């Protein structure tokens, strides 16, 4: 497996740019509706995308096989997708991508970490140099999530330990 990365905070200049892009998206075009008090439509997109790099100590990295036909054969991708404009409006530019990443992970895999957002740790794209800057400027946000066998089993469903103490 490659390097594990940790996320650094966005600069205020990048945050201002992100907010100005999203404000224009939310003010008076197809993403905006007077009916719902100025909030974006439920399916309006913000321009950001969020992805989850999910790792299991025994099984490795979770990749999803795309159902879209691609030239060259099979195509795999990380769970993730668009940050909705409503999420950006409700949670702001720092937290909305994490909320969207957890939502997309649930929608695509059934793994529900929406009530444990702290488990999704932002990835620092700066360590990737110019490629990381390019991804960040294109609105891509990545989170890492370490999972284990206990994440797939409810604690009350685990049988009591039968060994002697």
Image (cartoon, grey):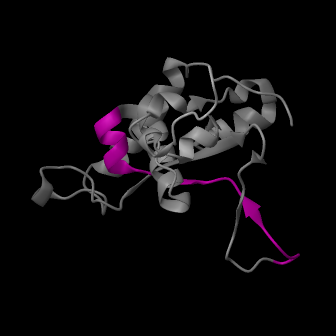
Q: Position of residue 18 (x, y in %)?
A: 47, 35
- Foreground residue, 139 or 101? 101
Q: Is residue 129 visible?
A: no
| Left or right: 131 in relation to 148 | right
- The number of numbered badges drawn on the structure is 0
Q: Position of residue 117 (x, y in %)?
A: 45, 33
Residue shown at the point (65%, 30%) measured from the top left: 123
Q: In the displayed structure, would residue 86 be above or below residue 96?
A: below
Quadrant of the rendering where the C terminus is positioned? top right
Q: Magenta span has 74?
A: yes
Q: Quadrant of residue 10?
A: top right
Quadrant of the rendering where the N terminus is positioned? top right
Q: Magenta span has 15?
A: no
Residue stretch in magenta:
71-91
Q: Is residue 33 visible?
A: yes
Q: Quadrant of residue 126?
A: top right
Q: In the displayed structure, would residue 155 be above or below residue 112?
A: above
Q: Position of residue 56 (x, y in %)?
A: 71, 41
- Foreground residue, 57 or 104? 57
Residue shown at the point (44%, 34%) measured from the top left: 116
Residue shown at the point (14%, 55%) measured from the top left: 36
Q: Position of residue 23 (x, y in %)?
A: 34, 42
| Left or right: 68 in relation to 50 | right
């Amino acid at each position: 497996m490659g390097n594990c990365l940790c996320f650094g905070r966005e600069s205020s200049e990048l945050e201002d740019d992100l907010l100005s892009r999203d404000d224009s998206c939310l003010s008076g075009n197809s993403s905006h509706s007077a009916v719902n008090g100025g909030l974006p439509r439920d399916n309006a997109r913000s321009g950001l995308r969020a992805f989850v790099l999910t790792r299991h100590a025994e099984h490795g990295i979770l990749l999803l096989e795309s159902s879209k036909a691609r030239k060259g054969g099979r195509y795999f991708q990380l769970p993730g997708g668009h940050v909705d404009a409503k999420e950006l409006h409700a949670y702001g530019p720092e937290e909305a991508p994490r909320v969207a990443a957890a939502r997309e992970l649930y929608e695509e895999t059934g793994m529900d970490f929406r009530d444990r957002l702290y488990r999704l740790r932002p990835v620092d794209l700066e360590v990737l140099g110019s490629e990381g800057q390019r991804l960040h400027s294109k609105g891509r946000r990545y989170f890492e999530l370490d999972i284990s066998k206990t994440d797939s089993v409810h604690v009350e469903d685990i049988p009591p330990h039968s060994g002697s103490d």
